[in-house]
Amino acid sequence: MSAASDDPRRPAGAAERGMHDQTRISDLCLAIDLAVELAARASHSGERTIMGIVGPPGSGKSTVAQKIIQALGDDAVLVPMDGFHLAQEELVRLGRRDRMGAPDTFDVTGFASLLGRLRRRDEDVVYAPRFDRSIELPIAGAIAIPRDVPLIITEGNYLLHDGEGWQAVAPLLDTTWYVEVPRSLREERLMARRIAHGDAPDHSAQWVRTVDARNAQTVERTRELADAVLERGRGMTSKSLAASTLPRLDPSVAVPDYDRRAGEQQIVHLGVGGFHRAHLAQYVDRLRCAGDLRWRLIGVGVLEQDRALRDALAGQDNLYTLVTVDPDGAEHARVIGALSQYLFAPEDPQAVIDALSAPQTRIISMTITEGGYETDGAGEFSPRSRAVLADLAADGDDAPGSALGLVVAALQRRRLTGAGGATIMSCDNLPHNGAVAREAVRGFALRRVPDLVPWIDENVDFPSSMVDRITPATTDRTRMGLAERFGVEDAWPVRAESFIQWVVEDRFRAGRPAFEDVGARVVEDVTPYERMKLRLLNTSHQALGHLGLLAGRTMVHEAMQDADIAGFVGSYMRHEALPTLGSVPGIDLEAYCRSLEERLAGEAVRDTLDRQVVDASDRLATFLAPVIRDRIAAGDGVGHGALILAGWRQRLDDFERSGADARELPDPLRDRLLDAVREDRDRPGAFLDLPEVLGDLASSPELRAAFLRARQHLVAEGLRSALRAATTARP
């Protein structure tokens, strides 16, 4: 992290890491990423890196160090300088008790000696002391540092100090980061810390103004010697998100300035996940920001696992923050206020049915994943989930527990009360998702209340739509990044790419918002757009997921930055997918492919490959199988598609051989898949006998031959060779 320099305190080899002058680190997430990189490099080289985190009292050094340690797990150990505090009785003997924390109140010789032992790395285990603030004493031998730990982090005030004895410390550090916060914030923290440990407020204030202030000045003089400065001012004064705090948020955060209670007509949405909150909810928010307050949005949590989101949103007035990331990494934060209410079906299904059946509810929208519609490979309703089967078998008075059960119960209520028809709009990544939703709702009704089906046919529209925005799952890293960058404490923010696309058919029985005014494309037929997206973006995600994980990658951008994988994905798009598309009105398909490659390779969104392979059987059936079917019908090759299937099979084979619990496989067909893999070992090609995934393709001799070639190549010559062979071959 440091520049080349003649300063003897700069460690040898720092310049080799390519950093020049002093680096500024804008947020803790970036700091964690850099620390992870340092640990990875050290581990790969077999060397050990010692990182120093320095800053004045109250700057948050310990917090930074702890966050990095949490992210790295067993790859790092924290060795605090405070463990070398002189004991109270020694400070009294030396007459230094009244300036505890000054440079001469530490055993600097012992500290430097420990760092030297850690650098030599010739002991199986080295033990270090820690400082217990509850008793204001160091505890000897409290921290064990095994020989194989690649990254050591030490934090303290005086790591770069040149006073007596301290000049020996800096040369033992490979990199030093200075943590900087506003003085007022530091002093506020120090006061709170002393009072929490029983000190009187007046004495605490006096100590902070004198002793701590002198020590801070000493540390501040070393700032320019650090390799990097971590600026933590804004994030450390973050505010909890709520309606009352909106006026006090950082000006860089856009906030809703409309009446959130307004709206005579309703959209009720089932499945309030991250994608919905980054997509449809933002379109509604845009409308309301533009002054169109005619439509309000109500969210519904259907699954028990939605309880955590319900609780999070309830604590912040159903507000949440959407962070969008540009291709160049620039981030923008907006508080979304479109969600006027959140209903939780497991606790109050009748409230959900009331909302769905209300006369003012004109649109019922859904994001319930591919598997939520309970249709088979032929597109027919085929219930299999426990919740749907329970709803179909329930007594008449039992409240439904599935999305389909809730919707059909509401439609029955609408018929009986004369509330009128409505539009059911799927927002899931499915071809012809409107037709799928229609089949699911009609199929459920046919089994539950058959006389309702004619009313549905007469009074309910099912427009198809194409939706697109890469939206990773919310993690603690998402929350921490928002607090650090924008000063907002949000229990459940959403982070997404800046790109957004929505194409929806103009078939709305009871009216609709003017979505076209806020960026959506409203068309007569969505088919060419959805086919484009599913076959290019979504299938590419599947390729990256299965093949990238086989290559040892963990993130989408890492896989896409692998030349062999990127070459394969680009070749798949242009040579297998594009020829099946035809023209798409208003879209330059080659430009679209290039934009996809740029989006997938971008580092800013940080989407995981593990997320791409969840429910792979559903997704491959939806995304890839139609491409293969059209290619075979046209007499064209399917080498790329076959390799994606072979990569999926290889991942499942590795999983099965690992002895892992089958329940850890995130797929609705997990048992069938693992059985197919075992059979495929003895009878190559048996893996294709999955009609739930491939339908009639399971018996295709063209697919079987291509799959066997890809499978053999992958097993015999490895992933790299298989990727290059598929890329260079022309279908």
Image (cartoon, rainbow, N blue to C red):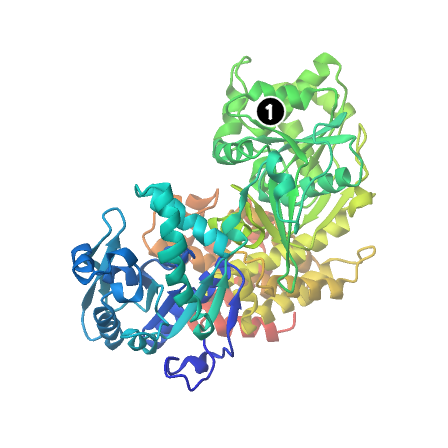
Q: Which quadrant of the view contains residue 172? A: bottom left
Residue positioned 52% across, 48% down in the render? 237
Question: Which image quarter holds the N terminus?
Answer: bottom left
Q: Quadrant of residue 120?
A: bottom left
Between residues 151 and 432, which one lies in front from this camera angle?
A: 151
- Image coordinates for residue 26, horizontal then vertical, percent: 54, 62
Task: Establish if 509 lies above or below 688.
Answer: above
Q: Secondary structure at mark 1?
A: helix
Q: Is residue 592 above or below residue 432?
A: below
Q: Is residue 203 left or right of residue 430?
A: left
Q: Nearer the viewer, residue 15 or 554?
A: 15
**Which amino acid, by three-letter code, is at mark 1?**
Leu
Q: Position of residue 718 (x, y in %)?
A: 45, 71
- Residue furthest bottom as drawn: 6
Q: Is residue 625 left or right of residue 685?
A: right
Q: Which residue is mark 1?
A: 406
